[in-house]
Amino acid sequence: IAEHRKDKHRSYIYEPDSFRPLALLEGFGPKATKPYHYQLDHLGTPQELTTPEGEIVWSAHYRAYGEISRLDIGKIDNPLRFQGQYFDQESGLHYNRHRYYNPDIGRYLTPDPVRLAGGINGFQYVSNPTGWVDPLGLNTCPGGDGCKQQSKIESPTEQLKVDEQTPSTPTPQKNKSYLYRGDSREPDEIFEKGFESRGESTDLYLHSINNASPPSNFVPTSTSRKQALVFASGFGFEEGFLYTLKRIPGRDVNKELGTRSKHKNELEIAIPGRIDSKHIIGASPVNEDGTYKGYTILNPNRERP
């Protein structure tokens, strides 16, 4: 996503399959472009912008529904607010893609385009702004399985064609292009060495039961970010990291084992041998409860397009 004016050019980079901003690139051309890194809270709301040297160039405090209560540092301007929202300087409103949001009252100015599919209150943002987000301006639930459409029911956005003739944007529920792995090891180690398998066993069934006995030749990954977060947090007992990987070839455990698959909910893709560092995009620090902390760290050794 980028914006261009006569004397300014900016690009915004987001985490894969999300509306969580990673970096702001300001300037024309690779030599003149200066990067700034977003420091986010647990909701993915920008708290600070920093230079590569660590200098804070933008910092702010927010009220509960997204209005900036105090601008601490404003050496550059930052228009990004809650996930999916862009601050409109002329109106003072937040553009939420499908409609405008007023952070002063915590309400949208127009009713939900998906009508009752978005809840009884068509002007509501979310019921709990300290724990939920609404990047598209179409939901009233926290996301994940809570917002998942029931089978054989067409998505309300498809029914009303609210996306018609507009560019497609990342959708957190669709993880078709990436693999995920939860791990307790630090990014410095993983970015350098990648992920190694435990041993030589190529028995996929035994791997699915316990990849340590016998030592498996497969590295476990998942197509589900949610499942990988469970492993990243040590099943709720420790802090860890969620690693995002390119969709490299592997063996679909559920598909190959069928009814013999013991952990179908893990949606595992078993990668033979090892995962090279170049296929690892980045790492997101995770708390014990599975929530994000800090900001995503990009792998400097990743393979570029």
Image: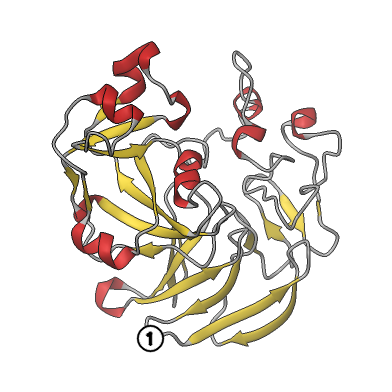
Q: Residue at x 78, y 51 (%)?
A: 128
Q: Quadrant of residue 25?
A: bottom left
Observer-nearest of 147 and 158: 147
Q: Can residue 106 be seen in this view?
A: yes
Task: State the scheme by which the image is colored.
Answer: secondary structure
Q: Mark 1 points at which residue?
A: 53
Residue at 66%, 44% (x, y): give it.
Answer: 98
| 73 up-or-down from 28: above or below | below
Closer to the camera in the image, 248 or 82:
248
> Residue 48: where, in percent of width, then height?
56, 76
Left or right: residue 297 versus residue 32 is right
Viewer-proximal residue, 20 or 32?
20
225 is higher (above) or lower (below) than 186: above
- Inspect the image, locate mark 1, and give the three-letter code of the amino acid beneath it: Glu
Numbered disc 1: secondary structure = loop
Q: Image point 36% across, 21% down: which residue?
A: 254
Q: In this view, does 238 lie to the left or right of 297?
A: right
Where residue 174 appears, as percent x and y from the top left, is: 47, 35
Is residue 170 something one can see in this rendering?
no
Q: Position of residue 75 (x, y in %)?
A: 55, 87
Task: Between residue 79 and residue 302, name the one nearer to us.
Answer: 302
Q: In this view, does 121 lie above or below 70?
A: above
Most extreme residue toward the front is: 213
**Image quadrant containing the N terminus:** bottom left
